[in-house]
Image (spheres, rainbow, N blue to C red):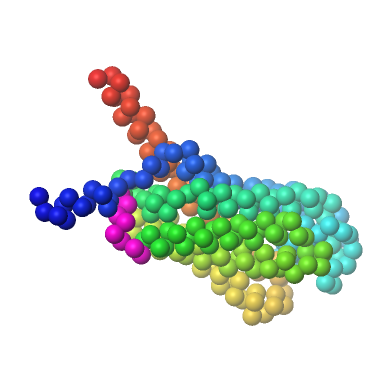
């Protein structure tokens, strides 16, 4: 037996994707979908002089603590606490996903039976980058929820910018990592690309566009859906692996 053959088993292996921490991590990423429900409920409860318009209203207006004029806009969101809580929950979900989902799992989640080969450094670095970027995005979103826009603190905008840039970048890297392993990779690339393009447009125009609400939602909606889609892929891999392990254990017990 050649030295290369004996070294292969140590370098290539299947991570324990059936562990509870991976399962929780996958569903933590999926938890970002609660944002859409919260936004819809808070928008309906809007009490400003005019109904809230998704095309012209900023997302952060829904979390503003006080009623009145803010930056030339009339804002009044009685359920601001719900919107801000949703931001925090979304951020914590991303943070949990970044912490609990290992780089090994991210590398194999998109293709059943794939093994991790630690001799390949680029995929390992890419998976680690996804975790770091996702964690930064989660931290930014938590800051957005804890520091509403009308408190006059720059931390709100810093958190929002951090979220839009890092979560879009995370989806691009994850899409490239999963390319040729699952059709979902293209969806992630589109979501990340649209969000980053909209973010760049918002930065260059300083959001001085006819429909700033539409532009901001092009920055935020695609990545929210993209992260949930990535969580679904991971959760399916974990569920499938857990099922296979139970079936193998049952077969062993029967023998």
Q: What stretch is highlighted in magenta?
A: 115-122
The residue drawn where x is 32% and y is 56% is 118
Q: Is residue 179 above or below residue 105?
A: below
Nearest the eye: 12 or 84: 12
The part of the image, by quadrant, that contains residue 46 is bottom right
Which residue is nearer to you in this view: 148 or 181?
A: 148
Query: Residue 115, image x and y in percent?
Result: 30, 49
Residue 107: x and y, percent?
38, 54
Q: Can residue 182 be seen in this view?
A: no
Q: Is residue 71 visible?
A: yes
Residue drawn at x 78%, y 67% as measured from the top left: 153
Q: Count the numbered circles shown.
A: 0
Horizontal arrangement in the rendering, residue 92 relative to residue 192 (left or right): right
Residue 12, given in percent of the width and then of the height, sits at 27, 51
For the C terminus, which image quadrant?
top left
Residue 40 sits inside the magenta stretch: no
As drawn, which residue projects farthest toward the top? Answer: 254
Q: Which residue is drawn at 28% across and 24% down?
A: 252
- Given residues 17 and 41, the one toward you in this image is 17
Residue furthest toward the left?
1
Q: Is residue 183 above or below residue 211?
A: above
The residue located at (33%, 27%) in the rendering is: 249
Which residue ends up furthest to the bottom in the rendered image? 204
| 126, above or below 45, in the image | below
The picture quadrant where one finds residue 139 is: bottom right
The x, y position of residue 51, in whole percent, is: 82, 58
């Amino acid at each position: 037996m050649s030295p290369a053959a004996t070294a292969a088993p140590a370098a290539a292996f299947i991570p324990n994707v059936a562990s509870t921490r991976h399962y929780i991590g996958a569903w933590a990423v999926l938890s970002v979908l609660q944002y859409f429900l919260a936004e819809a409920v808070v928008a309906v409860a809007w009490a400003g002089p005019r109904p809230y318009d998704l095309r012209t209203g900023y997302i952060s207006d829904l979390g503003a603590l006080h009623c009145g004029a803010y930056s030339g806009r009339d804002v009044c969101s009685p359920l601001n606490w719900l919107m801000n809580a949703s931001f925090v929950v979304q951020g914590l979900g991303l943070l949990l996903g970044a912490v609990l989902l290992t780089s090994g799992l991210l590398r194999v989640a998109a293709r059943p039976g794939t093994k991790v080969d630690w001799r390949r450094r680029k995929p390992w670095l890419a998976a680690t980058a996804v975790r770091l970027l996702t964690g930064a995005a989660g931290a930014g979103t938590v800051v957005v929820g804890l520091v509403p826009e009308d408190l006059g603190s720059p931390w709100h905008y810093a958190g929002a910018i951090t979220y839009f840039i890092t979560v879009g970048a995370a989806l691009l890297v994850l899409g490239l990592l999963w390319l040729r392993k699952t059709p979902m990779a293209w969806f992630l690339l589109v979501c990340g690309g649209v969000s980053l393009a909209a973010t760049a447009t918002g930065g260059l125009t300083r959001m001085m566009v006819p429909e700033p609400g539409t532009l901001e939602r092009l920055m935020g909606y695609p990545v929210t859906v993209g992260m949930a889609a990535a969580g679904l892929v991971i959760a399916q891999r974990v569920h499938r692996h857990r099922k296979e392990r139970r079936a193998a254990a049952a077969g062993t017990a029967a023998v």
